[in-house]
Image (cartoon, helix red, strand yellow):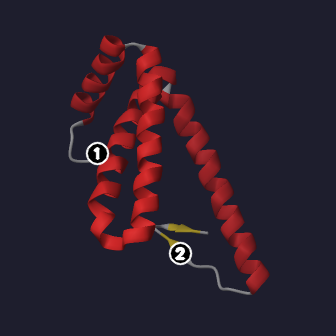
Amino acid sequence: MENAPRENLDAVCRAAFSHYGTELQLDMAQEECGELIAAINHFRRKGTEALYDVRSEIADVKIMVRQLELHFGVTDVDKIVQNKLRRVKEHIRNDRKDVGQQTKIIGQDRI
């Protein structure tokens, strides 16, 4: 979604929620997540021939997630994401300690 200007994405997402309503968009979010799960299962069986379907479903889920963020409050979601990322880093550190691995660098953050 980096290619789509955020304002345009947000405008379309808000319009979709407004037009279709909360219940239908919540149903659609569940449906898109289920389709991504199915595409991942297909990828596990068929390999790269199913890669486009996985990518397409990721795109659909990302759009629905953005709609949900706007509907339920993106600020709170962003804070929760940061907390969860800190927990993931801590789990990685603990896993490495358990197997005696060296600390590696992910991006600019030393984890």
Res. 12 image quadrant: top left
Name which residue type carries label 2. Answer: Ile
How many marks are shown on the rendered structure?
A: 2
* Residue drawn at the location 45% of the way across and 21% of the way down: 71
Q: Which amino acid lies under the numbered mark 1 shown in the image of this protein?
A: Met
**Where's residue 60, x and y in %?**
33, 41
Q: Quadrant of the C terminus?
A: bottom right
Label 2 neighbour load within 10 Å: few <14, some 14-19, many 20+:
few
- Where the N terminus falls, by quadrant? top left
Instruction: Give the side of residue 96 with respect to residue 79, left or right.
Output: right
Image vertical order of residue 67 relative to residue 33, above or below: above
Task: Find disc 1 in the rendering and name its residue.
Answer: 1
Crowding at mark 1 (Cα within 10 Å: few <14, some 14-19, many 20+): few
Q: Is residue 102 above or below residue 69?
A: below
Residue behind mark 2: 105
State the residue in front, 22 or 40.
40
Residue at left 46%, top 60%? 41
